[in-house]
Amino acid sequence: MLRTLTGLLMLLAALVPWPARADAAAARFVTVPGGHFVSSLLDGTRTVTVRVAPFAMMEKPVTEAQFAAFLRAHPEWQRGRIAPLFAGPNYLAGWLTPTDPGDAQAARRPVTAVSWFTARAYCDSLHAELPSWYQWEYAAAASSSSRDARAGMIRRNAILAALMRATGQRPGLIGQRPANVYGLRDLNRLIWEWVSDYGAMFPDVNGDVGSAGSGSVLRLCGGAALAFRDPSDYALAERVAALSMLAPADSSPFVGFRCVRNLGDAP
Amino acid sequence: MKRILATAIALALGCAALASNVHASPLPAGWACTPATCGAPEGKPIVEQLLPPPQVPARITRRYPAKVIVNLEAREVVGTLADGVKYDFYTFNGTVPGPMIRVRVGDTVEIRLKNAHSDHMPHNIDLHAVMGTGGGAADSIVIPGHEGAFEFKALHAGFFVYHCAMAPAAVHIANGMYGAIMVEPADGLPRVDKEFYVMQGEFYTPGAYMQPGLQPLDMKKLLDEQPTYVVFNGRVGSLTGDHALRAREGQTVRFFFANGGPNLTSSFHMIGGIWNTVWPWGGSNEDHNVQTISVPPGGTVIADMKLVVPGTFMLVDHAAVRMFNKGALGQLVVSGPEQPMLYRALWNRPFPPASAMPTAATSAH
Ligand SMILES: [Cu+2]
């Protein structure tokens, strides 16, 4: 039932006319060359090799300041005005006013507590879109020296430690760490990020409560091990768990986003 | 009214069927769900009074099945793992372990779980006292700022662990997200003078034992199952010094002891004491005159001891490195007059060496 509703909402969202283009000046996109890689998520029990076409991705997560500018230009997405179907009561709950994050570091802090719908609307305003899970995963696999640094235990441990250390606090500031080989920053250690197809990537987890089946393995303790190619990549498992439990109108204080453009799209 | 009655009868019959199906072997009186103990809930719903560990909720004197409401909140908090050492804990209600829950067999238990607005992770709860998918885990997943609830009937008396089962569960448990629930047999456990709630758990940090500062979770150590800390009630020193447990000679004390793990089996022991009665595995069988009890991760024991002499008794995981080097140590201070008939020191003094070793000269003689 919940699943049907979610599906309907997503369909509805596709039909709603999105706002006209906002000022994109502040958002810098970086080209990520295409390639093949093996996803850390299993498809059922199968390993998936993905071919990723070249795309352009925002260098940094969207900041509070950027999102505030978007809200001033598009008041219909402001807290208090937005339809509850698109953002629940926790949408930007920590902000001082509907358009003011009340944060002296707003230009350097990633915006969080935004719903999937609002993130999608922001990207749309830049003639861009949310990345797919595979695009995000492919981009985030890179370190400052390698295109696929996922196997490194030290890096994994550091990513998990960074995410744990943030307990109870606002997300940290963007740009404290070096960019990865593509020139992208802060993909792994700062926040979780919305992806366009998160509902489909983790089948059934937004589905009927209590439904049993292979798709709902993430719900359960031991079962979650079945969803990952390497179940010991705890940082990734935390990320997948955090995203997969959200409904598209939910917002979470640790979930932000960035946008991508498929090359060949608008500039 | 008719409908309520019908429901009650259906429930009673259902439970009767269950009682005969579920329990293949006979149980001690009161430990099974019977029509008499397992009917529809009576009276007003009871809101469970939750207390921080090592406190135990009052024993249940009620002799009818009730509806019990338990309010839990997932909270991610920076807390103290040892003096000078901080850690990012995942908790139920802000403490490690989460509060002990106490209900009666046959009760209908409503578990309400909130996830604090300041949290980052989704959390849930899997209670081992539940017969149902995931012990409630699947139906209690809450993202930060959300609340959820589910209900179960406590069909089996016993002492059970609960824990967060959110993926990756090893991380949530390693961060302290566990507690325990006592489902009392219908007539209660035998009365004792004092009850304590102690739960063991391991912590995995990159810094060495007692290295000061904020310590994150060390994934490598967790995967290798090589903890830096093995502690009672969430920190080194939770039950020592000013926090030592206290009782008087002549009293009988009861430990509700559980193991959150995530990985190590505890060898639960009281230095200087013998457990008069234990309920191994937290189940219905009693055993007596036991020294050390294995308590696996996700397992429990109820252990009673009559205190017949004064002194300081050490509560330990008898895997000795854990008590000496990793923090698995608590104290029970028993006050009262010495009992020389039961235990007394005799002497401690130098003794002369044995008669001189024969020398070469004497042996040649
Ligand atoms: Cu949890």
Image: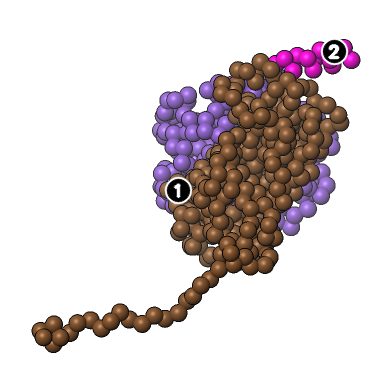
Q: In the image shown, does A182 or B296 lie closer to the viewer? A: B296
Check the image and name the residue furthest to the right. B1
Tint applied to chain B in the drawing: brown
**CA–CA distance in space, label 2 to label 1:** 54 Å
> Where B338 falls versus B89 (above or below)?
below
Residue linked to disc 1: B225
Mark 1 lies on a secondary structure that is: loop
> What residue is at 84 percent from the left and 15 percent from the top?
B5
Q: Which residues are magenta?
A: B1-14
Q: Mark 2 CB in 8 Å range of ligand 1?
A: no
Name the front one of labels 2 and 1: 2
Residue linked to disc 2: B3
Q: Quadrant of residue B361?
A: bottom left
> Quick check: do tags 2 and 1 share a chain?
yes
User: Which of the chains bears the disc numbered 2?
Assistant: B
Q: Is residue A237 left or right of residue A171?
A: left
Which chain shows up in purple?
A
Mark 2 lies on a secondary structure that is: helix
Question: Residue A5, image x and y in percent?
Answer: 71, 20
Question: Residue B161, image x and y in percent?
Answer: 61, 39
Question: Residue A253, image x and y in percent?
Answer: 69, 44
> Where B32 falls versus B340 (above or below)?
above
Q: Is residue B343 left or right of residue A45?
A: right
Label 1 amino acid? Glu
Color encoding of the figure = by chain
Label 2 amino acid? Arg
Magenta stretch: helix, strand or loop mostly: helix
Q: In the image shown, does B322 or B175 lie closer to the viewer? A: B322
Q: Mark 1 CB in 8 Å range of ligand 1?
A: no
Q: Is residue B63 left or right of residue A198?
A: right
> What residue is at 78 percent from the left and 47 percent from the top?
A95
